Image (cartoon, rainbow, N blue to C red):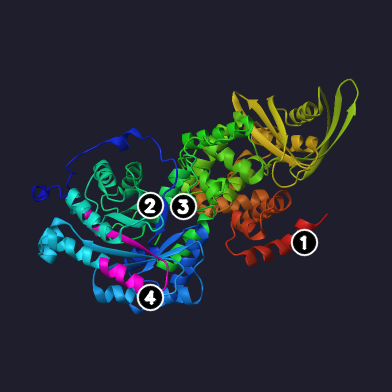
Amino acid sequence: MNNFEKYEKTYFMPPVVTYDWVKKTEIEKPPVWCSVDLRDGNQALIEPMSLEEKLEFFQMLVDIGFKEIEVGFPAASDTEYKFMRTLIEKNMIPDDVTVQVLTQAREHIIKKTFEAVKGAPHAVIHLYNSTSVAQREQVFRKSKEQIKKIAVDGAELLLKRANETDGNFTFEYSPESFSGTEVDYAVEVCNAVLDVWKPSADNKAIINIPTTVENAIPHVFACQLEYVDKNLKYRDNVVLSLHPHNDRGCGVATAELGILAGADRIEGTLFGNGERTGNVDIVTLGLNMFSHGVDPKLDFTDMHHIRETYERLTRMHVYERQPYAGDLVFTAFSGSHQDAIAKGMAWREEKKCDTWTVPYLPIDPQDVGRKYDSDVIRINSQSGKGGVNYILKQSHGINLPKEMREEVGYLVKGISDRAHKELTPELVYQIFSDNYINTKPVFHIDECHFKQVNGITAEVTINHEKESQVITATGNGRLDAVSNAIKQYFNVSYELSFYEEHSLTKGSSSKAVAYVGIICQGKTFWGVGIDADIIKASIEALTVAVNKLEEIGNSNTCKDARMIEIMNYIQENYIDITLDDLAEKFFLSKPYISKYIKEKSGVTFGELVKKIRMKKARALLKSSNMTVENIALSVGYQNVEHFNRLFKKAYNMTPIQFRNEK
């Protein structure tokens, strides 16, 4: 970049530099928190808050747990003045909460300020004047002694007015623009103010050090503050406060190192609102401490409500990557991250851990009101098998066998990649259901009867091409017997290689889920069944798996292999398939394939798609707890009323009546 030569460091190192703060490795207790949202934050808004909005915001700050709240600059505007008076006159200030007001070191402003706080149970009167080289030379054109006199005169006026006003007052002084002030001079001004106030153990004063415009690396500020801490008069009776800004993006680091260097108190805002790049973010600071096992004494457990209220009243937006509060800060899209989180959560459950050590999650999202299934692991084209399984488990109680997870993961993220969108937990389950539960395009099994004679004999009713045949076969177990019946009927060969079952962990506790994997010509095919009867669930899973075999479509009982292939493709893409898609897929013209479908199936393409969609809808109505609106969307209908009409026309009952039918 050009013109960098015109910039130079505008901060000053203290005359004596010490590094005691470096030896500290942790913040052991929270500072005194003072919210300046209603003053510093409010004055930075494009549209400052109204009186009613400020009252609501004040109540939220009280609910969060702030014990000190800067409510405004009463001499600056009628709204600020009325706000202070309303809080007092309506008795809205809790006994354990101190309000704070800001004033310049000017007599008429100080007078107006004390009029505003009269009757408050306890108030901090915050006095400031600017001390930096640039402000002294360019703005005020005054010497160091003259600037110090402004501060001392203001301190004396505060003392005088406090003695004349009913109330309980604490004094605070800020050498504004400290970041551009010689450190020893800033201390000299602060000590001159303290000599006026003479703070005691029963009446402490606050010295507030602001990084009005942040201009130094955080460790430089820590060295500056340590000098202030060691050279202030009346130190035992002074609360050393910080007011960090974020011009270099280091506000949180500046505050944390400042606490290590001796600060007792922090002034900041929720989500870092404030002029230019904002004040230090108290949410981040507090939850950083929380993540180290320190109670910040602020309650952020309902982060959604805090965020919603903040955004509504300030018209500001909490950035998606804002620490702890943003929409995406706990979200893992990456497959490896999802897998690590899922395994970490399983470890916690297995080991019954008391402490939080889950990979990629600095705190438990639930501690700030977030949900694992919708906030932590979310599915897109970058996701992996662990994340997809986690979503299915959290949302629907489906815990895939390890051997099955990779295939399902690639299927789901492939759909996300082609659609260029994130997939909701409901859509993930729909994709899983369509491909592993409800897909039986060639045949299904109506019923099975078993006899235990020299093993298990099964009488299996196979429904194929609208005809039912009863096949008798034997096996070393019920599922093996049914499998042998299917092999016998279709004259196919495969290996029943994998079986796993578990009870559903969500929804009906009486249902079980079975997973079946078969191997044919070196390739594994999976099916899943869900039923209150585990045998029925197992047979359903096997049926789905076998239906995926190409040999089933090409077996002697199948009359037209191409039609079965077309049907399979329509089954896989029924949500948004068009005749154009089908013609392109099978390298046929639209008129030809349209006529071909009508000849082979007896119905038009549109009637066929509608029939498949209705069949899918029936399956979802019986096998899931999805709403009718979501089922309509999942089978390709944007308008639920249109879906209801089609369903009723097809089955002489509404979807709700069908779901409730015994």
Q: Amino acid at mark 3?
A: Asp
Mark 3 vs mark 1: which is more N-terminal? 3
Q: Which mark is residue 484?
A: none
Q: CA distance from mark 2 to mark 3?
A: 29 Å
Task: For marks 4 and 3, give the CA distance.
Answer: 40 Å
Q: Amino acid at mark 1?
A: Gln
Q: Circle 4 sits in a helix, a strand or a loop, which is it?
A: helix
Q: Which residue is mark 3?
A: 327
Camera-side residue: 534 or 17? 17
What percent of the width, then of the height, locates residue 239? 36, 53
Q: Earlier in the sequence, mark 2 or mark 3?
A: 2
User: What SS does tag 1 mark?
Assistant: helix
Query: Is residue 29 toward the left or the right of residue 576 in the image?
Result: left
Local crowd at mark 4 within 10 Å, few (<14), some, or many (≥20)? many
**Which numbered disc flags the more N-terminal residue, 4 or 3?**
4
Question: How far is disc 2 from disc 4 in space, using C-alphas?
Answer: 25 Å
Identify the mark nearer the N-term, 1 or 4: 4
Q: Badge 3: few (under 14), some or many (20 or more) residues near its Cα, within 10 Å? A: some
Q: Secondary structure at mark 3?
A: loop
- Which residue was labeled with disc 1? 657
Residue 292's place in the image compared with 297, above or below, is above
Residue type of the residue flagged with mark 4: Ala
Q: Are marks 4 and 3 in contact (CB under 8 Å)?
A: no
Q: Residue at x 27, y 70 (%)?
A: 157
- Which contiguous range is marked in magenta? 156-178
Measured from the top left, where is residue 586 in percent x and y? 52, 44
Name the residue tied to disc 4: 116
Between circles 3 and 1, the one closer to the viewer is 3
CB under 8 Å between discs 2 and 4: no
